[in-house]
Image (spheres, rainbow, N blue to C red):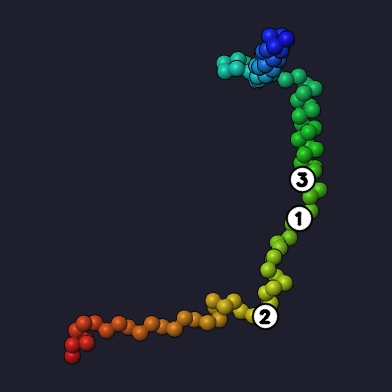
């Protein structure tokens, strides 16, 4: 019974690996020429592009938002511009201190 279970398990693993290998067929390989598109495919692509452009026109224009607008009052100046830092006194040189 154990032997049959191992065989079935191995068959299941092989089947899963084979299925994913078949799915990796992918697009055309390097050096192969693309197949020419039919007139119906070209028309469908153009129509899809036009529909996409129309859908972009339906989006309303976004306004700038200020997340801190309710916290900050409009009449108060910014703190950095309101208060200038005091000027630092000039350091005395060694010659000036000796006099």
Decide which of 78, 25 is in the foreground and name it.
Answer: 25
- Is residue 77 visible in this depiction of the protein? yes
Q: Select label 3 or label 2 by which is in front.
A: 2
Residue 44 found in image quarter: top right
Residue drawn at point x = 57 percent, y = 78 percent? 79
> Decide: marks 2, 1 in contact (CB < 8 A)?
no
Using the numbered discs, state the Cα–Cα distance from disc 3 to disc 2 in whole angstroms: 38 Å
Residue drawn at point x = 76 percent, y = 19 percent? 38
The image's mark for residue 61 is: 1
Residue drawn at point x = 70 percent, y = 70 percent? 69
N-terminal-most mark, 3 or 1: 3
Residue 53 x %, y %: 76, 41
Residue drawn at point x = 76 percent, y = 31 percent? 46
- Helix, strand or loop at mark 3: helix
- Helix, strand or loop at mark 1: loop
Q: Is residue 61 left or right of residue 85?
A: right
N-terminal-most mark, 3 or 2: 3
Q: Residue furthest bottom?
A: 99
Which image quarter holds the C terminus?
bottom left
The image's mark for residue 90 is: none
Q: Is residue 71 left or right of residue 86?
A: right
N-terminal-most mark, 2 or 1: 1
Residue 22 x %, y %: 68, 15
Decide which of 2, 92 is in the foreground and name it.
Answer: 2
Decide which of 27, 21 is in the foreground and name it.
Answer: 21
Using the numbered discs, state the Cα–Cα distance from disc 2 to disc 1 in whole angstroms: 28 Å
Residue 92 x %, y %: 27, 84
Pointer 3 residue: 56
The image's mark for residue 75 is: 2
Residue 18 found in image quarter: top right
């Amino acid at each position: 019974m154990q032997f049959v279970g191992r065989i079935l398990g191995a068959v299941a693993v092989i089947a899963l690996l084979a299925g994913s290998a078949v799915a990796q067929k992918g697009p055309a390989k390097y050096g192969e020429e693309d197949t020419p598109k039919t007139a119906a495919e070209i028309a469908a692509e153009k129509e899809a592009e036009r529909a996409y452009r129309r859908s972009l026109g339906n989006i309303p224009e976004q306004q700038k938002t200020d997340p801190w607008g309710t916290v900050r009052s409009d009449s108060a100046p910014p703190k950095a511009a309101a208060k200038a830092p005091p000027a630092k006194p000039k350091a005395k040189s060694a010659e000036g201190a000796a006099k």
